[in-house]
Amino acid sequence: MRYIISVFLILSWLIMTDSANAETTIIKLPVYKSAGQLWLDKDGNLQGFRLKVLEELNNVLKKDSIEFRYRITEWGNISIKRCIKEILDGNYDAYFGLIYSKKREKRGLIYSKVEIYSIPTVVWMNKKNMFKYSGLESLRGKKIGIVLGYPYLHDIKNSGFIVRRPDNDETNMKMLADGMIDVAIDNVIRTGTVIAKMRLSDKITYADKPFSVSDFYIAYNKNVPMQIINKADAALKKLHESGAIKKILDDNILILRQK
């Protein structure tokens, strides 16, 4: 009789466990390569500190049976344009780490109220030609390199600024190292990762004063229930208050300036 009861209890526990797992809400995310933040390695495994932040978020949301999960497809990394389209079409549920855009919001994206993290966009310069950056006026007359397609150039789109538009980060940094441009503008993580990879840390640094600060949010499609969005916001707030996200950033952001 005891054996039958034990078997019954085990079976009941397994059924309850399967039921709990089945009730977990999975928020599907596309994979978009963002240097220093998220990428697929040569073996097809996700890397980057954005993944570590996501893991911390999922740990907090476990009690609510919510899980954000990257969906890796045969295409691997997909373009940001395609990511947005796939989310709006309902093939994915959200984008983890998107800068707010009113245009994208009008298209139907719903942004989290709490940012995931913030990253400074900085003015990079050649150590041989350093100057004090104190705002836009200090860039006037200088040749500025900004990778084609990067969105934060509106302040310098006028005749008073000389802008070069290389196709990628590597070309931008080579131009800066070779003196073909005077400065480059980009966030500290993306370009910092490229500089480290190209071994240019001894030639390139960045100004103390940031050009701007970019906040990264979760952007959902309209099919994601508001209660899930609210719970994710509450979890992000908790991670900020505990210092967990700051620690991940402190441990992973590449600070290239040599003291």
Image (cartoon, helix red, strand yellow):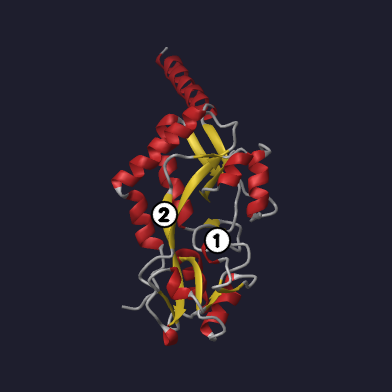
The N terminus - image quarter: top left
In this view, the residue in front, 205 or 251, is: 205
Q: Residue furthest front?
A: 159
Say which element carries label 1. helix
Percent from the top left, x then y, of residue 239?
A: 35, 44
Percent from the top left, x then y, of residue 121?
A: 45, 63
Task: Look at label 1 and name its amino acid.
Answer: His
Horizontal arrangement in the rendering, residue 242 relative to residue 130 (left or right): left
State whether residue 29 appears in this view: no
Q: Is residue 12 above or below residue 242?
A: above
The C terminus - image quarter: bottom left
Residue at 60 percent across and 54 percent down: it is 32
* Picture quadrant of residue 114: top left
Task: Look at label 2 and name its amino acid.
Answer: Ser
- Marks 2 and 1, Cα distance to the nearest angstrom? 20 Å
Q: In this view, does 90 lie above or below 173?
A: above
Horizontal arrangement in the rendering, residue 57 relative to residue 225 (left or right): left
Give the mark nearer the N terminus: 2 vs 1: 2
Horizontal arrangement in the rendering, residue 28 relative to residue 12 (left or right): right
Percent from the top left, x then y, of residue 85?
A: 67, 45
In this view, the residue in front, 132 or 4, is: 132
Q: Would you name the residue on which mark 2 appears? A: 118
Using a 10 Å C-alpha cutoff, classify the residue at mark 1 as few (fewer than 14 neighbours), some (14 to 19) or many (20 or more). Answer: few
Residue at 38 percent across and 70 percent down: it is 255
* Disc on res. 154: 1
State whether residue 211 appears in this view: yes
Say which element carries label 2. strand
Using a 10 Å C-alpha cutoff, classify the residue at mark 2 as few (fewer than 14 neighbours), some (14 to 19) or many (20 or more). Answer: some
